[in-house]
Image (cartoon, grey):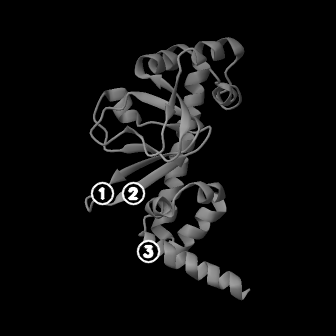
Amino acid sequence: MDMIPLVTQLKEVYKLPGKELSKVIQLFETVQVKKNQHLYRSGDIVRYVYFVEKGCLRQYYINNNGEERTIYFKLENGWCSELVSFLDNKPTDLNVQALENGTLQFINQKNWVYAVTHIQSFTMGFIRAQQDTNLMLKKRLAEATVETPEEKYLRFIKEEPVLLQRIPLYHIAAYLAMTPETLSRIRRKISGQKLLI
């Protein structure tokens, strides 16, 4: 079983020493996912925390108008779950879908609780990762309240150029909180401006 990306992540980001690293790695399992497969849907209780070894996941919800709103995309070396549901055994309002065929490492609640309560470096790494996620979401929320749709897209292509190559435009539109038609207009406008330069 190839867990090299997870091992690298736990060593370099979580700063796990060798002995603790071996303990944590034993708590994970591997699963292959297919494009468009859902790992969980709204109403489910989330049973796992996932690490993306290969592929792309998106987390999204469906608003009161029936529109999908993407919260984030996770590519290789990203973590994905919904901790309120995972830890409290409550149904989630969120959905997670694989956008590509991929390979995930996952840990169940019992093993995750063991790692967090018995392996200090894993606990500290997890806290740092949650802080980073919270900062990213706050930054994105702040930007979304002041940016025009065009500014949102320009920031996206600057910060996430890889996603443009891998994710359908309608998912990017849902992430940027705009319709696919609005995104198409913005892309045409930007392309026209580049031709004039």
Position of 88 relative to 137 (above/below)? above
Q: Which residue is mark 3?
A: 181
- Of residues 102 and 123, the one nearer the viewer is 102
User: What crowding class fits label 2: few (fewer than 14 Cα within 10 Å), some (14-19), or many (20 or more)?
Assistant: many
- Of residues 54 and 132, the one nearer the viewer is 54
User: What crowding class fits label 3: few (fewer than 14 Cα within 10 Å), some (14-19), or many (20 or more)?
Assistant: few
Is disc 2 in contact with disc 1, using a CB cutoff of under 8 Å?
Answer: yes
| Helix, strand or loop for disc 1 | loop
Q: Is residue 159 left or right of residue 101?
A: right
What quarter of the picture does the C terminus occupy? bottom right
User: What crowding class fits label 1: few (fewer than 14 Cα within 10 Å), some (14-19), or many (20 or more)?
Assistant: few
The dot on residue 107 is none
Q: Which residue is mark 1?
A: 63
> Percent from the top left, x then y, of residue 6?
63, 28
| Helix, strand or loop for disc 3 | helix
- Of residues 53 and 107, the one nearer the viewer is 53
Residue depicted at x 55% and y 38%: 102
Is disc 1 in contact with disc 3, using a CB cutoff of under 8 Å?
Answer: no
- Dot 2 amino acid type: Arg
Nearer-N-terminus badge (3/2): 2
- Dot 3 amino acid type: Glu
What quarter of the picture does the N terminus occupy? top right
| Helix, strand or loop for disc 2 | strand
* Disc 3 from disc 2: Cα separation: 15 Å
Q: Is residue 45 left or right of residue 100?
A: left
